[in-house]
Structures are given as C-alpha cells and as structure tokens.
C-alpha cells in the first residue's frame, strides 16, 4: 500500500520526485487486523503546507 501512496504523491510533485515524507505507524482499531490498511492522516486530498526552512 505504501508504494501505491508514494506513487500517487510523486505524480503530484514537481519533476515526479518524492516531495512528501511518509510515516507508517500501527494503530489499534476495533475490527481490523494489523495487516489491513485503514486510513491516511491527514485524509487523502488534504493540502499539506511546507514547513519553513530550518
């Protein structure tokens, strides 16, 4: 699932280079096993503003 999400993000990024860093974490959700994709956070389609340069 991660590669599909990264591929979709790359399509939106300048030069098709990865412009977002993904973090995968396990969360307990009633009714789901640990091997099931549940959601993205923030939700798909959300505008994520760039952090200011450090």
Image (cartoon, rainbow, N blue to C red):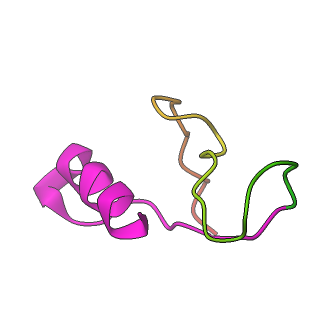
In the displayed structure, 25 sits above or below 20; it is below
Rendered residue at 53%/66% (across/down): 22
Question: 9 and 36: which one is in front?
Answer: 36
Q: Is residue 52 left or right of residue 11?
A: right
Rendered residue at 41%/63% (across/down): 1
Residue 8 forms part of the magenta stretch: yes
Question: 50 and 11: which one is in front?
Answer: 11
Q: Is residue 48 left or right of residue 45?
A: right
In the displayed structure, 43 sits above or below 33; it is above
In the displayed structure, 17 sits above or below 8; it is below
Rendered residue at 64%/69% (across/down): 54
Question: 3 and 15: which one is in front?
Answer: 3
Quadrant of the rendered structure where residue 36 is?
bottom right
In the displayed structure, 31 sits above or below 49; it is below
Quadrant of the rendered structure where residue 34 is?
bottom right
Q: Residue 37's x, y, as percent?
A: 57, 56
Which portion, as a residue range, is magenta?
1-27
């Amino acid at each position: 699932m991660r590669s599909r999400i990264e591929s979709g993000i790359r399509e939106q990024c300048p030069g098709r280079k990865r412009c977002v860093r993904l973090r995968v974490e396990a969360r307990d959700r009633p009714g789901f096993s640990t091997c099931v994709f549940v959601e993205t956070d923030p939700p798909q389609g959300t505008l994520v503003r760039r952090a200011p340069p450090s």
